[in-house]
Image (cartoon, rainbow, N blue to C red):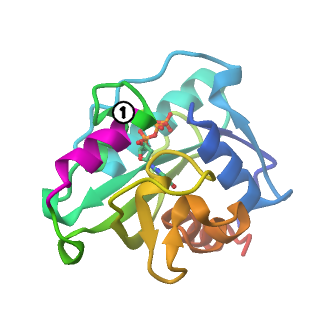
């Protein structure tokens, strides 16, 4: 069993930090990479796995601590899996509201039954910057893209993501409920098992 008291989270996304820390409880303290550097690494990989490893190594190098990265995104069936790894950059770096507006516009004439999508999350944990054996865990969450935004919780594409098992948008779920069933929750559950925390 590996034990960590503190891990640096290789993310500048406050929503991810909140969700991941809530899932871990007080067993492990996540420290944001923002405490060490405000420079975000370029996400040059072609997969969630490559980008997660790249972000984790970068954070471990900067902080000198074990590092956890989350690379995630929304894969829309009708768009052949786009925006996928480019989800954060979908509207050219203009932020969540612009990303959501663009997605609604691109799908405006697409009927219900063709609006399937999944959230993807890959977590990568490295013990140090050159770790030859990163721990990788993934989680998927199937849903559908709504025709208008709904709900105030969460972040990113949550207001557009309809959750079939709850019949509401992901942004209408309580944070505790989202953290039980999301793509991130599934990946974290696997990671906890791998670390002997489950
Ligand atoms: O639970 C979620 N609920 C809603 N939207 C979500 C979720 N999970 C990922 N997403 C979206 C946000 C962003 O558009 C992209 C992640 O991009 P991604 O590069 O992994 O994260 P990021 O740039 O926000 O922060 P960072 O790279 O510093 O961890 O997918
Ligand atoms: Mg990013």
Of the pair 143 and 147, the residue shown nearer to us = 147
Of the pair 177 and 135, the residue shown nearer to us = 177
Asked whether residue 2 is in view, the answer is no
At which x and y percent is residue 60?
58, 32
User: What residue is rendered at 14% in x and 59% in y?
Assistant: 109
Q: Is residue 61 above or below residue 115?
A: above
At which x and y percent is residue 98?
36, 33
User: What residue is rendered at 47% in x and 22% in y?
Assistant: 40
Of the pair 119 and 47, the residue shown nearer to us = 119
Residue 157 falls left or right of residue 89: right
Q: Which residue is mark 1?
A: 98
Numbered disc total = 1
Of the pair 33 and 173, the residue shown nearer to us = 173
**Image quadrant assignment for residue 177:** bottom right
At which x and y percent is residue 188?
59, 64
Q: Is residue 79 above or below residue 46?
A: below
Q: Is residue 108 magenta?
A: yes
At which x and y percent is residue 21?
73, 52
Q: Is residue 78 magenta?
A: no
In the picture, the quarter occupied by the C terminus is: bottom right
Residue 115 falls left or right of residue 173: left
Range drawn in magenta? 98-109
Residue 80 falls left or right of residue 150: left
Q: Is the stretch drawn in magenta largely helix, strand or loop?
A: helix
**Image quadrant assignment for residue 89:** top left
User: What residue is rendered at 53% in x and 63% in y?
Assistant: 170
Q: Is residue 154 above or below residue 112?
A: above
Check the image and name the residue furthest to the right.
26
Asked whether residue 102 is in view, the answer is yes
Q: Does label 1 point to a residue whose CB lies under 8 Å from ligand 1?
A: no
């Amino acid at each position: 069993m590996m034990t960590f008291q503190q891990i640096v989270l290789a993310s500048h996304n406050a929503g991810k930090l909140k969700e991941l820390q809530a899932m871990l409880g007080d067993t492990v303290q996540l420290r944001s990479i923002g405490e060490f550097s405000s420079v975000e690494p370029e996400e040059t990989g072609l997969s969630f796995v490559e980008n997660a490893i790249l972000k984790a190594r970068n954070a471990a190098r900067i902080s000198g601590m074990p590092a956890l990265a989350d690379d995630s995104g929304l894969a829309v069936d009708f768009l052949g899996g786009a925006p996928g790894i480019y989800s954060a950059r979908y509207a050219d770096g203009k932020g969540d509201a612009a990303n959501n507006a663009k997605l609604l516009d691109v799908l405006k004439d697409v009927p219900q039954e063709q609006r399937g999508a999944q959230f993807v999350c890959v977590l990568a944990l490295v013990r140090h910057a050159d770790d030859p054996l990163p721990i990788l865990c993934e989680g998927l969450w199937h849903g559908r893209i709504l025709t208008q935004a709904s709900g105030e919780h969460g972040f990113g594409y949550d207001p557009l993501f309809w959750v079939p098992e709850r019949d509401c948008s992901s942004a209408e779920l309580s944070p505790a409920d989202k953290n039980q069933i999301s793509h991130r929750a599934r990946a974290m559950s696997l990671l906890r098992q791998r670390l002997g925390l489950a």
